[in-house]
Image (cartoon, rainbow, N blue to C red):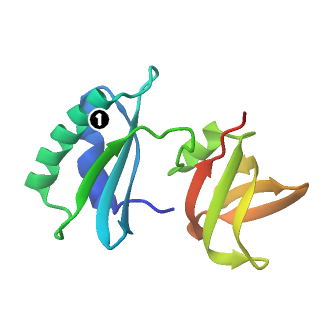
Amino acid sequence: MRSAPPRVCECIEPAVSGLGYEFVGAEYVTESGQRILRVYIDTENGIDVDDCAKVSHQISGVLDVEDPIREVYTLEVSSPGMHRPLFTPQQFESFIGQIVRLKLGVAVLGRKNFTGELVETNDTGVVVDVDGEAYDIDWPMINEARLVPQF
């Protein structure tokens, strides 16, 4: 899954949870030629701009001291939003029965994108039902996973 390097997450998670927020996950991506460390946080009551600023300030200090990323990057702190990213098997387990969009690094039966109901998680991966057909997708194949909001 498209996640920040483990060392980065190890630095961030205690700082986020120490402030009383859930560390949903982090991704380290390149967009328009710029490196971005995007950190997702949540609470039962949701997240606002002040929460993001508070967490950003805290983890900026931690990242400056620990220095797990040696190149120039921009730090973004955000709520997971309606298109919530899924990073861990436990998060997938929490959303069984929901519609997910998976982007794979390797094609499965000629496809790299799957949108369907998350039916099951197991030790090796997930099962997604796409238009009545079940697909077994192994964890290492998933580059990105997000919930698809249903209205």
Residue at point 11%, 45% (across, down):
61
Q: Position of residue 102 (x, y in %)?
A: 64, 60
Q: Residue furthest front?
A: 32
Disc count in the image? 1
Q: Position of residue 42 (x, y in %)?
A: 42, 32
Q: What amino acid is found at the position of numbered circle 1 in the picture?
A: Cys
In the displayed structure, does residue 65 sit left or right of residue 6? Answer: left
Q: Secondary structure at mark 1?
A: helix
Q: Is residue 122 visible?
A: no
Residue 112 position by quadrant = bottom right
Residue at point 56%, 43% (across, down):
90
Residue 37 position by quadrant = bottom left
Q: Residue furthest left?
A: 65
In the displayed structure, does residue 52 sit left or right of residue 103? Answer: left
Residue at point 55%, 60% (across, down):
144
How crowded is the residue under tag 1: few (<14 C-alpha within 10 Å), some, or many (20+)? some
Q: Position of residue 7 (x, y in %)?
A: 27, 59
Residue at point 64%, 56% (across, down):
123
Above or below — where is 122 with respect to 143? above
Q: Position of residue 74 (x, y in %)?
A: 24, 58
Which residue, given by chain and number where applicable, does mark 1 sit on? 52
Above or below — where is 98 with respect to 85? above
In the displayed structure, does residue 98 sit left or right of residue 141? Answer: right
Above or below — where is 120 with respect to 133? above
Q: Residue furthest top?
A: 45
Q: Is residue 96 visible?
A: yes
